[in-house]
Image (spheres, rainbow, N blue to C red):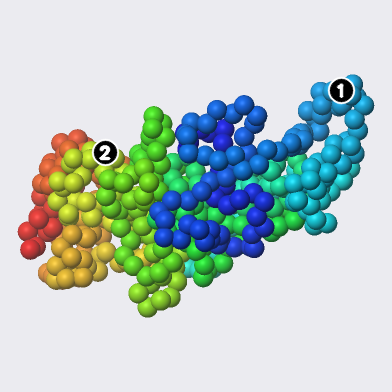
Amino acid sequence: MFGDTTLTLFSYPLDYELTEGEEYIDSTLIGNDFTWLYTRVPVGYSSPIREYEVIEQLYLPMTVEENKMQGIKSQKASSSISNDWWDMLENKSLDLTGNSNSAQKIQKAPNRWIPKATIRVRDNITNTYVPLQGVEVRARWWFNWEKGFTDVNGKATMSGSFDGKLNWSIVWDSHDWDIRSGYYGQAFYNGPNGSRSDWNLDIEIGGKSFVYGHIHRACFNYWNNIIGLKKPFDDNFWKQKIKIAVYDKAGRSYFGSFNRWLLGSPLAIYQLENDGSPRSAARIYNTTIHELAHVSHWDMDQSDFYKADDRVVESYAVGVAYVFSAQVYSAGQIPFGNWQDVEFRDLTGHFESKYTPLVVDLMDNFNQRFLGNTYPNDNVSGYTIAQIETAMKGAKTLEKWRDNLRDNYDNPTENHLDELFNNYINWR
Ligand SMILES: [Ca+2]
Ligand SMILES: [Ca+2]
Ligand SMILES: [Ca+2]
């Protein structure tokens, strides 16, 4: 069903008035591991799945653009029906189905308008509002809707016009990734109801939407290749996407098993720190990139990924998260950004013998041995993150990764690769 790109799916009933925010709980589904989806289909639609229910037969006069009105007008002229009559007909059908009240009557307005929305999320580390690009925004009135995707300024223009008021919403879903509230539920933001104006949303820290916004930003930047890496995952054949579960509690984010790929969420992000405070924008961004780097590594070679040395797997994700974070944060703002401060004893302690500065060292030109003999000796510099990614293909061990770097690239510091890798091969 998700493969049918003509369907616009909603995770709540279309005649249900939601309050603003991200919560819709169907009490009949508590304890179940699935959710209902709602949409409108034309007469004669052939469903790709058998498990569906027709809730209501509807007559819907479709809204059309002004410049497409000519054909409609001539049809109407031939049957002598004015625009007013169409509106009256729609209002009457709402009456007949018991769905009419003064607040929900179709408004007869002579001037159609094309709604626009601007979506930004607070960054509590840089103290700015960040425009979100690539967000799907929907404007809906009753069973008619239009949508648009935000541009680099966070602005979305709806695909068609409306006669009067409408309900705004965001669905945190895209071609390549899908953000979820918990393990199964679609993440969404329900905006103003009955709005007659453009929508400007600034998402503040403290709720799930803040987490959704920063996860979206991380996904958008990774899939749009801002630092020259391959996409984490790209499946045009099965049209699967990476599902990212957001939990509104404390916990350790992870990239887990793909065994339940089709239903579940292999990637989990937690909203809170262990002390119960909200995770910062930079933490959510950095963590999401770190987990997506695992997805990308898995996607490169699934068998190699599961057999690879933990130090390869985690050092790579650390490096990718560092480079992406450095695009949007200053050095001091990057979470766990002080990799040059890490001593050997920290590697076996706090960093669990697997999170290392190796990838950062391959790129930087700071030798932390300068700080003392308890620090790694790093005389390598100038490798790009894209070279490091490519060299990881076929490398399940640190030694093979090192050899691929030396064999595949010319780098003036490559004679120091043994020395650098030995810091991390031999410390334990
Ligand atoms: Ca270096
Ligand atoms: Ca270094
Ligand atoms: Ca070489």
Q: Amino acid at mark 1?
A: Ser
User: In what quadrant of the picture does the C terminus appear?
Assistant: bottom left
| Residue 241: x %, y % from top left | 41, 42
- Mark 2 surroundings: few (<14), some (14-19) or many (≥20) residues within 10 A: some
| SS for callout 1 | helix
Q: Amino acid at mark 2?
A: Met
Residue 198 visible in the shown view: yes
Query: What whole-number distance in Å separates the C-alpha atoms at marks 2 and 1?
Result: 57 Å
| Residue 387: x %, y % from top left | 27, 41
Residue at position x 51%, y 70% from top?
Answer: 206
Quarter of the figure with residue 321? bottom left
Residue 145 vs 268, above or below: the answer is above
Residue at position x 35%, y 74% from top?
Answer: 274
Are the residues at dot 2 and dot 1 in contact (C-beta closer than 8 Å)? no
| SS for callout 2 | helix
| Depth check, front residue: 428 or 44 | 44
Front disc: 2 or 1: 1
Say which residue label 2 marks: 300
Residue 235 vs 207, above or below: the answer is above
Left or right, 96 with reference to 427: right
Quarter of the figure with residue 296? top left
Say which residue label 1 marks: 74
Q: Residue furthest bottom?
A: 275
- Mark 2 or mark 1: which comes first in sequence? 1
Residue at position x 15%, y 36% from top?
Answer: 407
| Depth check, front residue: 26 or 255 | 26
- Mark 1 surroundings: few (<14), some (14-19) or many (≥20) residues within 10 A: few
| Depth check, front residue: 314 or 420 | 314
| Residue 85: x %, y % from top left | 89, 37
Residue at position x 34%, y 67% from top?
Answer: 251
Residue 228 visible in the shown view: no
